[in-house]
């Protein structure tokens, strides 16, 4: 079973280092993605005034292509758009266009209230 949870200890950092991921992101909140009890992904979110900033998303190579990165990204966006008026991604990726993000000088940005969560399975749009 998949589940995500904010992490307040060093476990995400240790996980990412064990995966060979360089940690050059701003400090912030780490969110871990678990499949059963095994950590298979992590995301880092930092904060600026009125803005949550998605700094990075990582999923282990053996679990990529299964939709887990999408699951983690959507969970992070849903959690932080409920309390802050803006959401920014610190890098540019066409992936975020489907949610309504637009490119900005420092990544991609959207007003939290404008995010849509499209479904590839024909569910809610």
Image (cartoon, grey):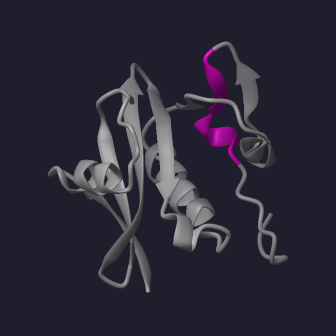
In this picture, is 14 found above or below 86? below
In this picture, is 63 found above or below 80? below
Q: Could you tell me residue 26's position as x and y percent?
A: 35, 26
Which quarter of the figure has residue 121?
A: bottom right
Q: Could you tell me residue 53's position as x and y percent?
A: 48, 32
Position of the C terminus, as image quadrant, is bottom right
Q: Residue furthest left?
A: 9
In the image, is residue 24 part of the stretch drawn in magenta?
A: no
Position of the N terminus, as image quadrant, is bottom left
Judge from the rendering whether residue 24 lies leftward or rightward of residue 89; answer left or right: left
In this picture, is 36 found above or below 48? below
Q: Could you tell me residue 33's position as x and y percent?
A: 40, 66
Q: Could you tell me residue 47's position as x and y percent?
A: 37, 28
Instruction: Please name whichever residue, 21 or 99, is drawn nearer the observer in this view of the structure.
Output: 21
Q: Residue at x 41, y 45 (%)?
A: 21
Q: Residue at x 55, y 54 (%)?
A: 73
Q: Which residues are magenta?
A: 106-115
In this picture, is 2 found above or below 80? below
Judge from the rendering whether residue 15 lies leftward or rightward of residue 35; answer left or right: left
Which quarter of the figure has residue 94?
A: top right
Q: How many marks?
A: 0
Q: Residue furthest top?
A: 105
In the image, is residue 114 part of the stretch drawn in magenta?
A: yes
Instruction: Please name whichever residue, 91 or 24, is drawn nearer the observer in this view of the structure.
Output: 24
Judge from the rendering whether residue 12 lies leftward or rightward of residue 52; answer left or right: left
Q: Residue at x 85, y 76 (%)?
A: 122
């Amino acid at each position: 079973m998949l589940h995500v949870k904010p992490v307040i200890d060093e476990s995400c950092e240790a996980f990412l280092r064990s995966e060979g991921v360089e940690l050059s992101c701003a400090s912030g909140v780490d969110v871990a993605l678990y499949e059963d009890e095994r950590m298979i992904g992590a995301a880092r979110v930092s904060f600026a005034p009125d803005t949550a900033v998605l700094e990075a998303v990582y999923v282990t190579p053996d679990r990529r292509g299964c939709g887990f990165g999408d699951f983690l990204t959507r969970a992070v966006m849903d959690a932080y758009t409920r309390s802050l008026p803006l959401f920014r991604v610190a890098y540019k990726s066409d992936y975020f266009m489907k949610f309504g993000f637009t490119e900005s000088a420092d990544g991609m940005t959207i007003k939290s209230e404008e995010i849509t969560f499209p479904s590839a399975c024909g569910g809610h749009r």
